[in-house]
Image: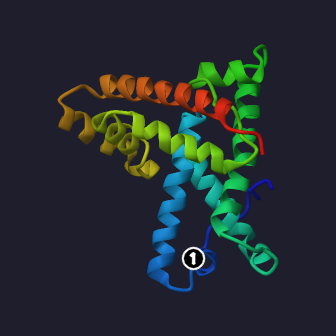
Amino acid sequence: MSMNKEWVLTQDAFEGLLDWLDPDRERAGTKYEAIRLRLIKIFTCRGCSEAEELADETINRVTAKVGEVVSGYEGDPAHFFYGVSQKVHLEYLRKAHIKQPHLPVDTAVSTLSTPPVILAEDIEPEYECLERCLEHLSSDNRKLVLEYYQQEKHAKIEHRKLLAMELGIAVNALRIRAHRIRLALQKCMEDCLVQQPAH
């Protein structure tokens, strides 16, 4: 499911997406935000340096297809987003490999960001591991990593400056701290996924 380069997100398309998530607009908005945050967490813990952009790309692709999907889809719409996110992640890996073709795909990605987490076929065990690993962090580190990766891309730079000011550190030091926390999360995720029972 590749994104049509000429497709532009319209208000009607977005309204259609919200209608699919829930007939009640307020509940639909809450579900939308929860799905987006979950996608950002997943891409972040897979070692993607552009987690917000990949989450938004996933949402845009679902929005573009929602008219075709609604009639035949059964179950929680959130799971459809997670299925599309798998494809977006694989494309990210391929693009990373193209930028550094002399390296294997996994190595190319790790040099661009951090080592990718093993890609689970079922998103639920992966997300359960993510939530468990987040709980293992100190409350300060958990808050930092979630806030660091949570903002919309246009507000991200300013938000990180404010976050660094609140912590009394330079933006570069904040970046390093967030990177270290993400590395610890990824290691925890890898260990957790290995221990997951086979389905």
Mark 1 nearby-residue class (10 Å; few <14, some 14–19, many ≥20): many
76 left or right of 179? right
User: Can residue 52 be seen by looking at this rendering?
Assistant: no
Q: Residue furthest bottom?
A: 23
At 61% from the left and 18% from the top, the residue drawn is 111
In percent of the image, x 75 and y 47: which residue is there?
87
User: x%, y% of residue 101?
Assistant: 78, 19
Is 47 on the left-hand or right-hand side of 134?
right
2 or 83, nearer to the observer: 83
Which residue is located at x 72 percent, y 55 percent?
84
Q: Quadrant of residue 16?
A: bottom right
User: Residue at left 36%, top 44%?
Assistant: 147
Which quarter of the rendering shows the C terminus? top right
Front position in the image: 189 or 57: 189
List the single residue furthest toward the top.
102
Q: Is residue 143 visible?
A: yes
Give whichever of 34, 129 is nearer the camera: 129
| Residue highlighted by disc 1 | 18
Give percent across and percent down for residue 187: 55, 25
What colour scheme was applied to this rendering of the protein? rainbow
Quadrant in the picture for the N terminus: bottom right
Q: How many marks?
A: 1
Secondary structure state at the residue bearing disc 1:
helix
Measuring from the top left, give residue 61's x and y in whole percent: 70, 60
Vertical order, 118 against 15 (above or below): above
Q: Amino acid at mark 1?
A: Leu
The vertical placement of 130 against 115, above or below, is below
Counting from the top left corner in percent of width and height, residue 64 is at 71, 67
Q: Is residue 13 above or below residue 34?
A: below
